[in-house]
């Protein structure tokens, strides 16, 4: 019988998790020698490939000697922490990957804290040992300090260490800069990760951990079989976390990972990670089991959302011209479907019925959801993000989410970073040189203050700074935070922008549109150089007469416009503005397109 080992690979963004899995798949024989393996094969989602990050947790399996290793690739960004928290319920061990030069980062701290809290004993892998600036001894000291700071027990502190290069495909038990293969790491996994502690003779139970939809077999639920054996065509029932019945059904398919593909099997035993089909209502955190079960399995609580945006129907003059999913019913169904599979997202229908509040972990998670929807053909309007406050039950004090911010900058830029962060109500907790002429600064900052700061930070540090942030806790309200300093240029007409008009507007500020871009009244076409909004005419053409001018015509040379990505737009807009998102365009606009309505709304806010 094959012996099982279930483990998750956890790390900070871009420390090499997915690349290491590529090498494990190749060297274990899961991918045939002649088979073409795409780089970062586990990042199968288009957005993951474009951004170079893991967004969705995914399972694979490799065979090593007499063992079957079920490996779960987890997201490294705290915004997708809901994925991490669920996945850790399926595994018995973890590989903590740390970059040999960059050392531990905020997201390392996030995923490691979840693993330690569950009682896992991670294996530490110092990755990218072939980097010229590798410093493995210092990194290991910092990893140990992090384990201790997170309250690791003496067994967890006695962690085994391997040194590796995922890209080159080797691992060693010694701090060397080259090696032959990953066999030492595979042997270490087999020795150190315990076998699943399960009861094979009890009735079948399984906690649904991941959900997806297959066009051929319907809803597919993935999880670890907690007890017993599940067989094809078996009658099962599903229970919610409170023990109420969801549905009775029959298993129509059992799928098990084998390398990059999933194969159908007739049965699966306790301890194995499998996907099953045949249930139509069951979702994440529900318990699936034999017909006689009455008690659900314990599901780990998920950290609450800290930020929310409003998503509403697109009502601009250009609505419905680029997307085919434009109605509130379509948007509603898609958002509630997302909330069903992504437990870190919460969707609430607003009183207006055409708008929905979507709460999540951060700007990145909400931005990825909106980007995914626009690629599916949706059109919608997005509001400025707002943080979710709460009231302290004991003191009655208003509290807001506080984030731990780690910033690495060249020494010459540290002054301006500290100044800008203090304006955003951040408190500096640590500042020290990190080598190579760089300084590492740690702040505790309110989430409100960080909205829109990343682009300003990159400008201040000439693109050389690195900013990482992590939700820390809820703390007392920090007071007012300075918002955007500049006003915007607002179009007062509808049509195609004219080069001559834009050329005359350049002295007013930075433009967001180029000639022949379709604009409408109330659309934001640029950033004003002053603090107030300004209505402008981007449609004004040069007056033509039948009199030849004495001088040569002015040559129109426009500065390239500032084109914003979705995340930049979400961070940029103010309270009275929206983002119009379509499959082809991202436009900024005022919430009220008519200038008279805008003045009325501004007076109402001022008098409130």
Image (spheres, grey):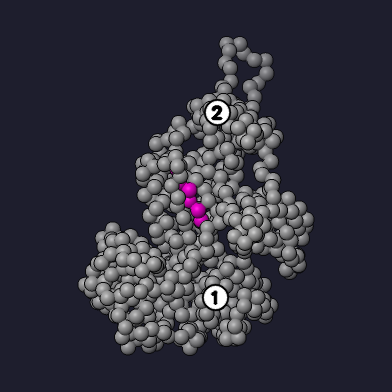
Q: Does 357 lie within the magenta span?
A: yes
Q: In the rendered image, which quarter contains the N terminus?
A: bottom left
Q: Does 86 lie within the magenta span?
A: no
Q: CA distance from mark 1 to mark 2?
A: 53 Å
Horizontally, is 601 left or right of 349 in the view?
right
* Element marked by disc 2: helix
Magenta residues (range)? 355-360
Horizontally, is 317 left or right of 531 in the view?
left
Residue 117 numbered tag = 1
Q: Residues within 10 Å of mark 2 (few under 14, many from 20)?
A: few
Residue 82 in picture, x, y percent from top left:
48, 64
- The answer to whether any part of residue 322 appears in the image is yes
Q: Residue at x 53, y 51 (%)?
A: 308
Q: Is residue 528 above or below residue 174?
A: above
Residue 41 in picture, x, y percent from top left:
43, 67
Which residue is disc 2 drawn over? 597
Horizontally, is 12 left or right of 353 in the view?
right
Q: In the rendered image, which quarter contains the C terminus?
A: top right
């Amino acid at each position: 019988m094959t012996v099982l080992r279930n483990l998750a690979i956890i790390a900070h963004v871009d420390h090499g998790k997915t690349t290491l899995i590529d090498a494990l798949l190749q060297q274990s024989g899961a991918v045939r020698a002649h088979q073409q393996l795409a780089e970062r094969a586990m990042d199968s989602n288009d957005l993951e490939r474009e951004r170079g990050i893991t967004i969705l947790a995914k399972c694979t399996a490799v065979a090593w000697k007499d063992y079957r290793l079920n490996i779960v690739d987890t997201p490294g960004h705290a915004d997708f922490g809901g994925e991490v928290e669920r996945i850790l319920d399926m595994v018995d061990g973890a590989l903590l990957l740390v970059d040999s030069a960059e050392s531990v980062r905020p997201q390392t701290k996030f995923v490691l804290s979840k693993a330690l809290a569950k009682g896992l004993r991670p294996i530490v892998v110092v990755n990218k040992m072939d980097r010229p600036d590798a410093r493995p001894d210092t990194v290991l000291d910092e990893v140990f300090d992090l384990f201790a700071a997170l309250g690791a027990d003496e067994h967890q502190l006695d962690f085994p260490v391997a040194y590796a290069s995922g890209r080159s495909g080797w691992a060693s038990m010694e701090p060397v800069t080259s090696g032959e293969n990953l066999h030492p790491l595979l042997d270490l996994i087999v020795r150190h990760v315990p076998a699943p502690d399960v009861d094979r003779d009890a009735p079948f139970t399984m906690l649904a951990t991941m959900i997806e939809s297959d066009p051929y077999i319907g809803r597919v639920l993935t999880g670890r079989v907690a007890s017993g054996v599940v067989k094809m065509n078996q009658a099962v029932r599903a229970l919610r976390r409170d023990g109420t019945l969801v549905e009775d059904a029959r298993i129509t398919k059992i799928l098990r990972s084998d390398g990059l593909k999933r194969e159908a099997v007739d049965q699966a035993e306790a301890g194995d990670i499998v996907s099953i089909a045949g249930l139509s209502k069951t979702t994440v955190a529900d318990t699936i089991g034999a017909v006689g079960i009455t008690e659900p399995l314990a599901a780990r609580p998920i950290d609450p959302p800290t930020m929310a945006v409003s998503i509403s129907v697109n009502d601009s003059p250009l609505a419905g011209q680029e997307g085919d999913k434009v109605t509130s019913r379509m948007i509603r169904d898609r958002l509630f479907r997302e909330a069903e599979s992504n437990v870190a997202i919460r969707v609430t229908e607003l009183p207006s019925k055409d708008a929905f509040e979507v709460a999540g972990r951060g700007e990145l998670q909400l931005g990825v959801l909106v980007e995914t929807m626009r690629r599916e053909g949706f059109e919608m309007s997005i509001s400025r993000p707002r943080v979710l406050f709460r009231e302290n039950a004991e003191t009655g004090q208003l509290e807001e989410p506080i984030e731990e911010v780690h910033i690495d900058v060249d020494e010459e830029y540290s002054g301006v970073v500290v100044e800008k962060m203090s304006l955003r109500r951040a408190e500096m907790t640590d500042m020290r040189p990190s080598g190579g002429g760089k300084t590492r600064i740690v702040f505790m900052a309110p989430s409100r203050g960080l909205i829109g700061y990343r682009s300003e930070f990159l400008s201040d540090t000439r693109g050389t700074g690195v900013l990482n942030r992590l939700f820390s806790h809820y703390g007392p309200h920090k007071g007012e935070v300075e918002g955007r300093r500049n006003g915007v240029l607002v179009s007062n007409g509808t049509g195609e922008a004219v080069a001559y008009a834009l050329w005359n507007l350049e002295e007013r500020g930075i433009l967001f549109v180029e000639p022949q871009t379709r604009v409408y009244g109330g659309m934001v076409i640029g950033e004003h150089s002053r603090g107030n909004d300004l209505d402008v005419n981007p449609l004004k053409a040069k007056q033509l007469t039948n009199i030849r001018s004495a001088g040569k015509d002015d040559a129109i040379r426009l500065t390239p416009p500032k084109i914003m990505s979705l995340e930049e737009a979400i961070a940029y807009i103010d309270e009275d503005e929206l983002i119009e998102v379509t499959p082809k365009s991202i436009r900024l606009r005022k919430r009220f397109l008519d200038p008279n309505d805008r003045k009325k709304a501004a007076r109402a806010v001022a008098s409130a």
